[in-house]
Amino acid sequence: MRSVHIAVAMIGIALPARAFADAPLAPEMSADRPVMCLRDASDQVWRIQCDPRTRVCLYAPNEELDSTGGRVKPLERARTCELDAPFDRAGMEKQGFTFIAGRVDAPYGWMRDERQRVFQVNFDLRRRMYFGVAYTPQKVLDDPLESTRTSVDFGLFVFDYLQGGRTPTRHRLRLFEGEVHMEPFSAEVVIAHYDVSHKFMDPLLRITTFVGEPSRHDLVLDLGMWSEVGSLELHKTPMGNSQLWRHATAQVTLDLWQSPNLDSFARIRTGVGLEGQRDDVNGYRSAVTESSAFDLDWVLDPNGFHNVRFELLHELPRYFTPTATTPKLAQRFKANLQYEAIILAINDQPLTLKLAAGGEKRDDLPGVPDKWAFVFETGLRFSLWAPPRAKS
Amino acid sequence: MGTAPGQIVALAAGVVLALAGAARADECTGTSSRGDRFATCFDVGNRLAVDAGSDGLGVGIALRHRITFDDDPDLEWKMEHALVDANYSVLESRFTGTFYSGRYLRHARDGHVLIPIGGTPTKIFLPFDIGAIFEIGHLDWKQEVPTFTIGVLRVAPLIELLRSKDYKRVLAIGPAMHWDMDVDREFLMTTLHTIAPFSEGVASLRLESTDGLWVTEARLEAGSAWRSDRGWHREARASATLEKIVVSVNDRPIALTAGFEYDSARNETLAKIGARVAVLERMDPRVSIRPLQPREVATPPPAEPVLPPVPEPAEPPMIPSELPSATASDGAFEAPLLDHASALAVIRAV
């Protein structure tokens, strides 16, 4: 036992107090390998992890350091380690092991700096609360300093839940999500949204071709469901105000492409909904609306920093009674492309840059010409929560 | 004799437990002259309260809880929610209420900014917590006004400066966004939108005494907002309330309240006083109305001295030849020859 203590003391003496440097980050210990905690002669605890394959031992202080290298506080999000286990540094050096200053390992989605401080580097923007502000010029020639084209967007609760396994299912819940544009005024709010994607294991059809070598081709139908309740859309037009309530909409989805954990997908969906529209010209009218859409939702990188969304929507409201300005059957087209990237995080809560371009064509609003109108916006979003993405 | 130390230990443990319970209860538990216990601390953040005052009758549900993480004990979310916070004034025929409002504060041991530029993200440390205010569904309805106002959304990211571990001290500032709309009561059509796209600032203060008897909350919002009828304009709102619990009935507190509200958009300043009754309230965990009772350990009755059984007096051998064959020389046994009475006296003495 005495020899162990001597060995530990020798380790401590040999390890420099300033185990960090301004140079590139020291190597990080592996989260999958065991780590030991050893006490040095001055009663300081060090973490040591040795790799018999490379014959390298990484060591790091078992506490966070201040800018001068002093130990200030316990490590955050660190594994427990066996304290004062037998360790013979001299013997290991005789076996060819070298000792290198390193960093303590961090959990998945986190990393440590040279002072052993931990911070999040992987974000799941499908689990968050967010709000943002954007500048939305109507035309490129608009004065960008004219702030009436400001818009805001928000989402009280964005939550994806993945049921894993061989046939995973992803549930997506959104509560009170929407955006408001100031001039000309328009707003859209969805009170509750839920959709679900499922990866089916067994194909609906399997086609075998016998031209050349026989081969099998599976046709998998990854069906799902999409629904919204309580959507409100407001517009201010040259002929007054218009408000559109989509009371409820239900659609069937078919995923054309899915990522393994279903957080990225391309799909088409179609279904019906019930809506009511009131404007200053026609008063109130109700409609049954057939709607179809193509959605692309794509997380471009493993850490969730780059996200692309695209939606192409077509709606056919069939009014129960025609009005003076619109026929019994109206049409709405809408397209929106959005790119969102994390630019920094404040207390591990990401701030993202949003770039979006969209267009709309509709004939249900009195005073709005039935032609495509395009907008482009760029802005910032601040998100709360956004934990690390699930490890795939 | 073998069980006596165990009984003593159990008794001591019971006494220690009882003392520990009393010591914990003393912090927030009062005792009447008859020995009955009552709460002296109140969890004012978890309750269903009814208000009556100069501004009418009101009701509100308050909830607060923490979200903690096993892998990071130094991080927690302090969540405060207010549900269906409503008030109706009979004198003014006016209804105001908010469907939901929440304040979420992320309390961490360290505050920092992460800048993910280059291969190695950079971390800059900041001395504050962060959080947000989120309110949806505010309604202001007045009989004499042809429109009512719906506060669709009010949201603000927050920087919290006091970094308290509990809910009792909050000082937070941040940019605020809100979207309000006026709706025509007859046609149910929106007639006016007011939007502040994070062009206002908000400061929020909450101070609560340790025992919950005093609570004060203040909020100030000011900045520029855009109106759909006349564009940008300045606006400001301020509110403050003070609540003092003065009595409790069945440990449900009744408080006196005072406060004021100012709104530049309505050109209105309102002072109010009233009383607040907590119809339902979570018992403060520090209160011990029914303290832990020391385990009843029966004191063992004094042990009767047990006399060893008195053997029947052996008949003295009649003749020496009937004695055991052992002899004194082997040292194994040497019994003096006693008569019956002497033997009995020796045994009792033992």
Image: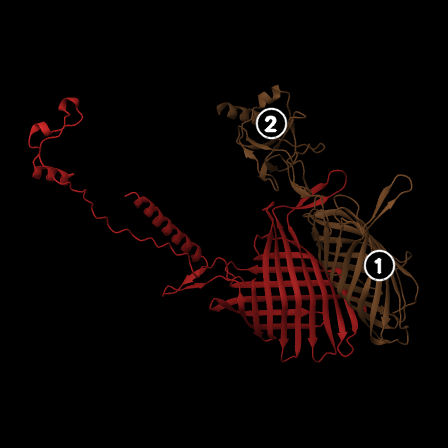
Front residue of this view, candidates B260 and A226: A226
Snapshot quadrant of residue B272: bottom right
Report helix, strand or loop for mark 2: loop
Query: Is residue B229 visible to us here?
Result: no
Horizontal and vertical percent position of residue B269? 66, 72
Q: What residue is at 66 percent from the left and 65 percent from the top? A: B100
Q: Are the residues flagged by discs 1 and 2 in contact, CB closer than 8 Å?
A: no
Horizontal and vertical percent position of residue B55? 61, 75
Q: Colour of chain A?
A: brown
Q: Which mark is residue B269?
A: none
Q: Earlier in the sequence, mark 1 or mark 2?
A: 2
What chain does mark 1 sit on?
A
Q: Amino acid at mark 2?
A: Leu
User: Crowdedness of circle 2 by 10 Å Cα count: few (<14), some, many (20+)?
Assistant: some
Is B215 positioned to the left or the right of A101 in the image? left
Any idea which chain is the red one in this picture? B
Q: In which quadrant is the C terminus of chain A drawn? A: top right
Q: What residue is at 78 percent from the left and 44 percent from the top? A: A301
Horizontal and vertical percent position of residue A304? 75, 46
Is residue A292 shown above or below B315? below
Residue identifier under label 1: A293
Is A112 positioned to the left or the right of A279 in the image? left
What chain does mark 2 sit on?
A
Q: Residue furthest top?
A: A94
Snapshot quadrant of residue A110: top right
Horizontal and vertical percent position of residue A118? 65, 41
Q: Which mark is residue A15?
A: 2
Q: Amino acid at mark 1?
A: Ala
Query: Whole-Å distance between the Cαs marked 1 and 2?
Result: 62 Å
Report helix, strand or loop for mark 1: strand
Query: Is residue B320 visible to us here?
Result: yes
Front residue of this view, candidates A121 and A296: A296
